[in-house]
Image (cartoon, rainbow, N blue to C red):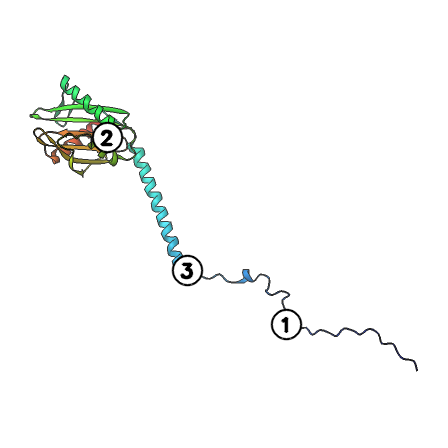
Amino acid sequence: MSESTAGPSEPKPVDVADEPFALSGSEAGDDDAKPQGPVSRTRLIVLGVLLVLGLAGAAVIGWTAWRITSQKDATLTVPPQVAGLKLDESANAQTTAEYLTNAIAADVDLDETVGAVYTDPAAANRSVLFFGGTTLIWTPGSDLDTAFELISDEEGAVTGLHEVPTGDLGGTMKCGTTASGDGNMAVCGWADHGSLALAMFPNRSEADSAALLREIRAEAQTRE
């Protein structure tokens, strides 16, 4: 009887699950399929604060730019008469005015300067010394403080310096007192982004001096 030769053994079948299975450890597109969680309340608050700060910063920059633009092109003149005062055109008055304008120009870089002595017809001892100039001023308050420093001698500088109302022309205005041979004398000044000026008021109160300087400024200062 002849023996039958056994053929090669056939592979056993592999059991396959009834449900489909992944070929890799994670299914493709899992990240895309995951729903995004809600944005946290803290993040919303932070974003809101940053937005508000950004808008506020833009508003401040815009306001500052507008103010500089509206004030920078200023002109100062010396009216022959202003606020009941009359321009003193004597040689002594002109020498005094020149000295004062040179002094302020040495401390503050000005493009144009003006100076004048005004007499008060009602009282010979209440003359007003007015001097200043024009240029583009980036920091009016700081430059005004610098200008006040020039009114100083061995008896002392301007003391009690404080802000006072500026009137319609804006900027900043301050008044104080300085010692003189006849006692304390009021000193006031203003500065904006286009002009700076000081005035000395013998035998006047600070309140009267501030009001008088506002009148002088309204007549002396113009803007393009």
Which residue is found at the position 37% from the left and 47% from the top? 54
Number of residues whose C-alpha sits closer than 10 Å to that of mark 2, classed few (under 14), some (14–19) or many (20 or more): many
Where residue 171 sits, quadrant-wise, is top left
| Amino acid under disc 2 | Leu
Where disc 2 sits, the SS reads: strand
Query: Front-most of 222 and 1?
Result: 1
According to the picture, the residue beneath numbered tag 3 turns out to be 40
As drawn, the label of residue 196 is: 2
Residue 78 in sight from this viewpoint? no
- Which of the two labelled residues, at mark 1 and mark 2, occupies the earlier sequence position? 1
Position of 88 with respect to 70 (left or right) is left
**Which residue shows up at 21% across the image and 29% down it?**
197
Q: Considering the numbered disc 1 on the image, is that residue within a helix, a strand or a loop? A: loop
Please give the residue where the numbered disc 1 appears in the rendered image: 19
Mark 3 → mark 1, Cα distance in angstroms = 39 Å
The one of 196 and 176 positioned closer to us in this rendering: 176
The amino acid beneath tag 1 is: Glu
* x then y, percent, for residue 9: 80, 74
Mark toward the start of the polypeptide (2 vs 3):
3
